[in-house]
Image (cartoon, rainbow, N blue to C red):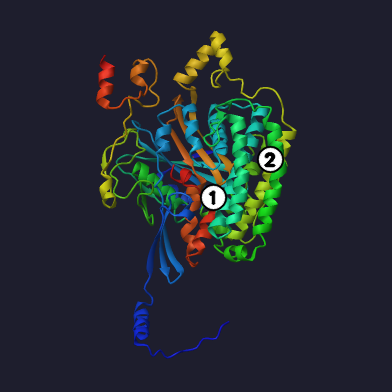
Amino acid sequence: MATRYEMEMIDSAARAHQAFEEELHGEKLIVNMGPSHPSTHGVFRMVLELDGEEITNCWPEIGFLHRGDEKIAENMTYTQFIPYTDRLDYLAPLANNVAYAYAVEKLCGIDVPVRCKYIRVICAELARISSHLLGIGAMSMDIGAMTVFLYTFKQRELIYDLCETICGARLTTSYTRIGGLANDMPESFIPMCRKFIADLPATIDETDKLLTRNKIFIERNKDIAVLSREDAINYGATGPILRGSGVEHDLRKANPYGGYENFQFDIPTGTVGDCMDRYLVRMEEMRQSIRIIQQALDSMPGGEWNAPEAKIVLPEKQAVLTKMEELIHHFINVTQGINAPVGEVYFGAENPKGELGFYIVSKGGGTPHRLKIRAPSFVNLQLVPLLCKGHMMSDTVAILGSLDFVMGECDR
Amino acid sequence: MQRVVERDKLLETCRQLKADYEMLTDIAGVDNFGEDPRYEVVYHLYSFQKHEYLRLKVKVPEDDMIMDSLVSVWKTADWHEREVFDMFGIRFRNHPNLKRILMWDGYPYYPLRKDFPLAGIQTELPEYAEDAGKAEAANMLGGPFFGGTGTTSSREREPRQYDTPAEQQEKLKS
């Protein structure tokens, strides 16, 4: 603790300055942050009320990227909406495709073959790694560790290559179809993926060495924005944020879907619920994802990758061109969409950012009557005022980084 | 699991259910245009012990679109309810900050209602976007995306690329 000295100021200008400051003492300063701010990872606006450096209040504002996806969904067939799911969480488009496909399949009451499930698991876990790599990279860059971002981005590039191999697109994958996949996984994918997951731990370890015991990183994250277990549940937080606060909840374990019950993996949880815990949970989740991918590759079954549902799944192109029955199904499926039964379903999938849920109300026919997207970022962002209050202005970048949100799915 | 709840019993029911179903996962508005009561608000609760969801449905008639807010039970209801208000115009009693969330303040319509056109309606932008002019209805190019079959020829149903709407009219006539 430094000793403080009272000093008499002779300078009249300095005295005037002091008087000026004393008069202003206690007045709050309103600072606008965003919507275009590097640490808001998109278009997110915060209005902060500051007392000196300390945040006394915070009002987040969203909606700058609102595209009306739910309205659009009501006016197109189920299959036509798949490309729109790429643009929800655009850092993990494959995971969104998978979640949406399972939701519509639940509505139609169909089950996909095991091979399809395993391929989808690999896709979802690759997406999780990709999202966490960016989340950790961007978070560390925001608080001053530029190097990590470059290392993680190099690995993300390899994931994009894998996406390209499996479905032909790097970002807008649209890989799943209702009842199956756009195409089978190519043979060349397996050795590529094996090489990737063999090399990835080195990058994770390197990141670990650079950050986890880094004094600056710890000071910026330890005991910052502590989220208690009760608050996390009360605010509906999901994903690494909920697990960081010590709740062992993962939909892949709690409500297993898509063959996750066949894989061995652990759910990391935090103890304190601060930014550091959320970071550590993400690091461990990447390692667990590698484990899952390894198991899925080792036990990849052969056979069909599309469900044997002629009226729902698009037939193979070759068959469409040569066989009458397939041509009819193809025509009906493309022009009218699948004839979904009347009913409603909610399907929640464990996405990298949390629980991505689709609530579909069907009145029959090819288009949904209502399709509600429960976006994890939308719910998690509600925590911002709670977490920011009482912290320094400079901590906001660490807090936003640890929440790891993406506005594409928040605003929809 | 699904349960239909009376509108005035919702708050009480949720307070009791919170012991079993700790988390409020989602709130969705549904517009059943042409039915009575017209609107529905659907709540999804999740239980960490039972690992299951519970769906609560509340019917909201068109002439009295107000219901109790759940913010006092679950904090997460705040933004969800604002979204339902923003998209359907259903009001929530005792909500701490019931204003638009995805659309801008002062936007006059409720876009997810079934009688709101897909293309949108021309609207004045808020004051601070003075130079931006107006939010215009989208050019649907003969859309919507999915027009059913058999009603008109595919040429009229499907979106085509034309430079101007006038040109499109001309092409359709010929």
- What is the quadrant of residue A310 in the picture? top right
Viewer can see residue B48: no
Quarter holding the N terminus of chain A is bottom right
The chain containing the residue under callout 2 comes to A
The residue where tag 2 is placed is: A196
Residue A206 position, x and y percent, is 68, 53
> Which quadrant of the figure has residue A305?
top right
Nearer the observer, B129 or A363: B129
Q: Are marks 1 and 2 on the same chain?
A: no
Dot 1 amino acid type: Met
The answer to whether residue A334 of the structure is visible from this angle is yes
Residue drawn at point x = 71 percent, y = 35 percent:
A296
SS under mark 1: strand
Q: Which residue is mark 1?
A: B23
Question: On the rendered structure, is A146 left or right of B130?
Answer: right
Image coords of residue A55 (percent x, y): 45, 66
Q: Count of labels shown? A: 2
Indicate left or right for B63 with A216 as reference: left
Q: Secondary structure at mark 2?
A: helix
In the image, is residue A300 above or below residue A92? above
Tell me if label 1 and label 2 are in contact, CB under 8 Å: no
Q: Amino acid at mark 2?
A: Phe
Chain at tag 1: B
**Dividing the image into 4 quarters, which one contains the C terminus of chain A?**
top left
Q: Is residue A254 above or below residue A9?
A: above
- Residue sitting at 58 percent across and 62 percent down? A221
Mark 1 or 2, which is nearer the eye? Answer: 2
List x then y, in percent, for residue A116: 64, 28
- Residues under labels 1 and 2: Cα distance? 37 Å
| Among the 4 quarters of the image, the one containing residue A364 | top left
Which numbered tag is attached to residue A92? none
